[in-house]
Image (spheres, helix red, strand yellow):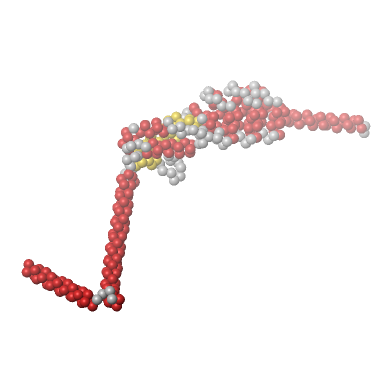
């Protein structure tokens, strides 16, 4: 066999294989390519092949681009592919961009893709920007949460309040901004604080709009992904008797009882101190009496010492004895006279 003919045969076979592969690829992407061509969103065959090699669904990217172009928006397939490869939802972002454009809301593909990659529903965000969303405060769907806010006015009356917050999505702050739970917590805190600063519960019941107005003016939507449109008091009532409606009276009663026990304890302490002082004074009296007796015991000893030293004569001693005996006699006579007079009176 001629070597040249063999080489030509091999080349022809290679060409045939390449042609067959190209035709196969063309037929495989024919539907997508024709759909893109007829819609004005032209995509080359090599781009479709590249998408397939990058494991990107060509029909998804082409259909998304067609929707964008039909809505009057332009976007390259590279940007759509990049978002898909990043783990984003291409259909959701494209639908959000179309909805935002129709609603005259400024939303770029980069911001929409960032919101989608952050785990938020970008379509719902655009819809909430057009139609505000109502949030219950407190959240009734939260497990274990109360269905009413609990607040106490300055006069001590306990109030139960339920509010509804109308919010609109702030797309510019949606990425990195706080969510609904923060809005609910801040509104609840603001309502409790506003009621707590009210002089009387009657003021709150008569003008609940003042509470909502005061809370709304507090700028509770700062650093959140939402803009508070309005805060409405949906329900407000005084707590039942079984739930300690008059917290102020209850606290005053407990305080009075505590003061009573404190005063009783102080009085008992003073009584015990007085008893201790009395016992101490009795002990001091006995101590003084003992000292007097001890001093009297020193008198005979001193007299004996004076007699020995010649400072006291015998006659002086007898004269002193006579004076003492005379004094004793006078005391005894005076005592009998006092007893006789008392018996005569009786």
In terms of depth relative to the viewer, which is nearer, 109 or 179? 179
Number of disc labels: 0
Residue 22 spot, x, y in % from top left: 75, 29
Q: In which quadrant of the rendered image does the N terminus lie?
A: top right
Give me the residue at 47% from left, 28% from top: 131
Q: Where is 45 relative to 321, above or below?
A: above
Asked if residue 172 lies left or right of residue 203, the reply is right
Let me know if residue 84 appears in the view: yes
Q: Where is 264 relative to 312, above or below?
A: above
Q: Where is 146 relative to 341, above or below?
A: above
Q: In which quadrant of the rendered image does the C terminus lie?
A: bottom left
Q: Where is 197 relative to 310, above or below?
A: above
Q: Quadrant of residue 54 in the image?
A: top right
Give me the residue at 15% from left, 71% from top: 331
Let me know if residue 242 appears in the view: no
In terms of depth relative to the viewer, which is nearer, 67 or 127? 127
Residue 173 spot, x, y in % from top left: 53, 31
In terms of depth relative to the viewer, which is nearer, 187 or 42? 187
Give me the residue at 18% from left, 73% from top: 323
Residue 342 spot, x, y in % from top left: 9, 68
In the rendered image, the residue lying farthest to the right is 2
Residue 174 spot, x, y in % from top left: 53, 32
Give me the residue at 32% from left, 40% from top: 155
Q: Quadrant of residue 28 in the image?
A: top right
């Amino acid at each position: 066999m001629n070597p040249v003919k063999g080489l030509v045969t091999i080349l022809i076979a290679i060409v045939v294989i390449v042609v067959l592969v190209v035709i196969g690829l063309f037929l495989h992407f024919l539907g997508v390519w024709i759909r893109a061509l007829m819609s004005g969103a032209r995509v080359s065959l090599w781009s479709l092949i590249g998408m397939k090699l990058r494991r990107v669904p060509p029909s998804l990217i082409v259909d998304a681009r067609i929707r964008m172009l039909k809505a009057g928006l332009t976007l390259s397939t590279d940007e759509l592919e990049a978002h898909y490869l990043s783990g984003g939802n291409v259909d959701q972002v494209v639908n959000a961009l179309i909805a935002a454009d129709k609603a005259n809301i400024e939303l770029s593909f980069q911001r929409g893709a960032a919101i989608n990659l952050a785990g938020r529903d970008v379509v719902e965000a655009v819809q909430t920007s057009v139609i505000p969303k109502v949030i219950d405060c407190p959240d009734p769907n939260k497990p274990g949460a109360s269905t009413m806010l609990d607040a106490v006015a300055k006069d001590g009356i306990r109030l139960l309040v339920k509010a509804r917050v109308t919010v609109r999505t702030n797309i510019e702050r949606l990425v990195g901004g706080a969510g609904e739970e923060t809005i609910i917590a801040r509104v609840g805190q603001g309502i409790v604080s506003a009621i707590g600063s009210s002089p009387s519960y009657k003021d709150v019941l008569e003008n609940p709009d003042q509470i909502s107005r005061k809370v709304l003016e507090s700028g509770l939507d700062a650093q959140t992904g939402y803009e508070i449109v309005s805060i409405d008091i949906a329900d407000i009532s005084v707590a039942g008797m079984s739930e300690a409606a008059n917290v102020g009276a209850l606290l005053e009663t407990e305080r009075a009882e505590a003061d009573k026990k404190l005063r009783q304890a102080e009085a008992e302490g003073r009584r015990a101190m007085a008893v201790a002082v009395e016992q101490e004074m009795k002990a001091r009296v006995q101590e003084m009496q003992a000292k007097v007796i001890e001093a009297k015991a020193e008198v005979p000893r001193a007299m004996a010492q004076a007699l020995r030293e010649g400072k006291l004569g015998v006659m002086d001693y007898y004269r002193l004895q006579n004076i003492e005996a005379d004094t004793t006699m006078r005391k005894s006579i005076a005592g009998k006279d006092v007893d006789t007079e008392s018996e005569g009176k009786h």
